[in-house]
Image: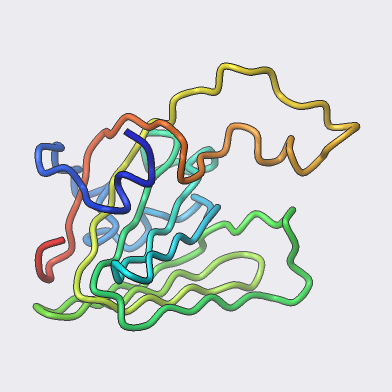
Amino acid sequence: MNVNDLLIGVRGELPMLPDEENPFLTDDALVGSQITRILVDVLGGTVGVLLELGQSTRLRGTTALLRVTGVEQQSWRCTPMADEFTAWSITGMTVQQRDDEFHLVIDCFPVGALLVVGAAADFTLLHAVAPDVAPPDDHFDPRALIRFGIADESTEVEPIGSARSAGGCC
């Protein structure tokens, strides 16, 4: 399975995550992880936030996908000095859940914020399968070296567990 498969839907047979790894129950569960991609499926009304967990002390796995369904609003704001070398480290997260509405605000360092409003959300903790190639030479392409080993939507992953928001089913 790859990350794109999970953007379409989370398999129901995954084990539930313990409360301390559930970002819908524990406000600081994602602190220290980094946003690497925001995937938008306009036709499906879905936004996926792909996270790198290498700096996280709270979560198992190497990557994770936070997926919001029934999306009505999504915005990303960041400091104008940011570029492709910026690591968007999560410093805080606010979740508001109702039966039919889910609000997510993620604050990042340096100055950045993601807002997603939708119907419901799920979070899947993952282990990315290691690439079977050597890292690129940083003298020729520093951007490729930074991206090496970071999961993207085509990365093969092994699910560890999942959590769902209090709202409607995903």
Q: How is the image coloured?
A: rainbow
Asked if residue 51 is positioned above or below residue 128 in the image, the reply reads below
Residue shown at the point (74%, 35%) measured from the top left: 145
- The residue sitting at the front extreme is 43
User: Horizontal placement of 5 versus 88: left or right?
Assistant: left
Residue shown at the point (68%, 18%) measured from the top left: 134
Residue closer to the observer: 78 or 72: 72
Asked if residue 79 is positioned above or below residue 158 in the image, the reply reads below
The image quarter containing residue 144 is: top right
Residue closer to the observer: 154 or 114: 154
Q: Looking at the rendering, in which quadrant would you find the C terminus?
A: bottom left
User: Horizontal placement of 55 versus 145: left or right?
Assistant: left
Residue closer to the observer: 86 or 39: 39
Percent from the top left, x then y, of residue 148?
65, 34
Percent from the top left, x then y, of residue 138?
84, 32
Percent from the top left, x then y, of residue 101?
19, 80
Image label count: 0
Residue shown at the point (64%, 75%) measured from the top left: 78
- The residue sitting at the right extreme is 139
User: Horizontal placement of 5 versus 105: left or right?
Assistant: left
Residue shown at the point (25%, 48%) measured from the top left: 20
Percent from the top left, x then y, of residue 50?
45, 52
Asked if residue 72 is positioned above or below residue 165 in the image, the reply reads below
The image quarter containing residue 147 is: top right
Q: Looking at the rendering, in which quadrant would you find the N terminus?
A: top left
